[in-house]
């Protein structure tokens, strides 16, 4: 691996849903200001791993985690971690866009408001900055009172990205953010990911191999809860070291 700043380090991470083990001994370093793609067949643990990075799995009953997930050298599973603060730092974009049934403005202002920002000027600046960062501002700036639910699918997903950005996260987790979108909207999201990595560390789950190849710097291949291979994306796609990785990438299974 190139010598870069690691933002997230998992060590011997195991995760169980009841008696079923969903992640097996995952040790992985994720680099700052890079895009890391998680690929692998359905049910292989990609999304579970992604959700373990901001403790979203805590919301699922009977989940047990072993091992550590360190963000900036702090184990987020140790006692006394403020999960609300953690999720401000580690934002999440889901597969299905989920705007609130509120105006575009209120969708983006929601996070800062619940974190105690009352100043109208600061809220307006935050909304504008976040919508610009999510490449949506030019399309909605004259219509911020319109319901977020009235936007197209691709715009809704960018609105959800703006909402995540409004609380100044450092890491963005994206769970198949373009899988429900048409090719044009998908291209916009991919372009956006490329721009956002200047300021954020991004981890993306994708079932679309071409997308992983296009947007990511590093790729991790998961299979049945195990991390099979992790390397620079161009290495994974052109010279994988494991036969399993090669078989998956060339479409022999998956």
Image (cartoon, rainbow, N blue to C red):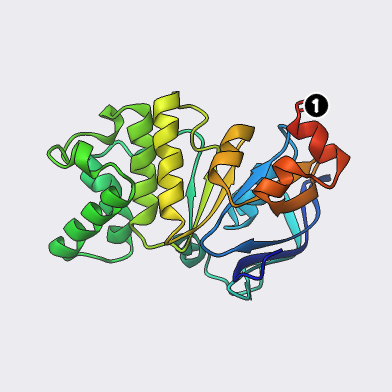
95 sits left or right of 40 in the view: left
- As drawn, the residue found furthest toward the front would be 238
- As drawn, the residue found furthest toward the right would be 243
Q: Secondary structure at mark 1?
A: loop
Image location of residue 54, percent across then percent down:
57, 58
192 sits left or right of 125 in the view: right
47 sits left or right of 105 in the view: right
Image location of residue 172, percent across then percent down:
49, 54
Q: Is residue 163 visible?
A: yes
Tell how many labels: 1
| Residue pictured at 25% horizontal, 65% vertical | 117
Q: Is residue 208 visible?
A: no
103 sits left or right of 237 in the view: left
Q: Quadrant of the N terminus?
A: bottom right
| Residue pictured at 63% horizontal, 61% vertical | 30
Which one is in front, 72 or 31?
31
Crowding at label 1, few (<14), some or many (≥20) Cα neighbours within 10 Å?
few
| Residue pictured at 33% horizontal, 56% vertical | 166
Residue bearing the label numbered 1: 253
| Residue pictured at 60% horizontal, 40% vertical | 212
Image location of residue 187, percent across then percent down:
43, 33
Which one is in front, 208 or 45?
208
Q: Quadrant of the C terminus?
A: top right
Image location of residue 38, percent across then percent down:
65, 45
Q: Which corner quadrant of the image does residue 145 belong to? A: top left
Vertical position of residue 253 compared to residue 4: above or below: above
């Amino acid at each position: 691996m190139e010598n870069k700043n690691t933002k997230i380090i998992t060590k011997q991470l195991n995760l169980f849903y009841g008696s079923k083990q969903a992640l097996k001994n995952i040790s992985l370093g994720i680099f700052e200001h890079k895009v890391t793609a998680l690929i692998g067949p359905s049910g292989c643990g990609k999304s579970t791993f992604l959700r373990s990075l901001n403790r979203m799995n805590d919301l699922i009953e009977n989940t047990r985690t072993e091992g550590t997930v360190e963000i900036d050298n702090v184990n987020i599973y140790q006692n006394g971690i403020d999960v609300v603060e953690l999720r401000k730092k580690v934002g999440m974009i889901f597969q299905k866009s989920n705007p609130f049934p509120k105006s575009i403005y209120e969708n983006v202002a929601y996070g800062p408001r619940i974190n105690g920002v009352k100043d109208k000027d600061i809220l307006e600046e935050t909304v504008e900055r976040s919508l610009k960062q999510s490449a949506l501002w030019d399309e909605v700036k004259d219509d911020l009172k319109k319901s977020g639910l009235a936007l197209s699918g691709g715009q809704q997903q960018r609105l959800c990205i703006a909402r995540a950005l409004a609380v100044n996260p450092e890491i963005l987790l994206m769970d198949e953010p373009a899988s429900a979108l048409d090719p044009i909207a998908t291209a916009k999201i991919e372009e956006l990911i490329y721009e956002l990595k200047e300021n954020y560390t991004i981890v993306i789950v994708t079932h679309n191999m071409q997308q992983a190849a296009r947007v990511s710097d590093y790729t991790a291949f998961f299979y049945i809860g195990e991390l099979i291979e992790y390397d620079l994306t161009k290495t994974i796609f052109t010279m994988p070291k494991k036969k399993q990785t090669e078989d998956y990438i060339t479409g022999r299974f998956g």
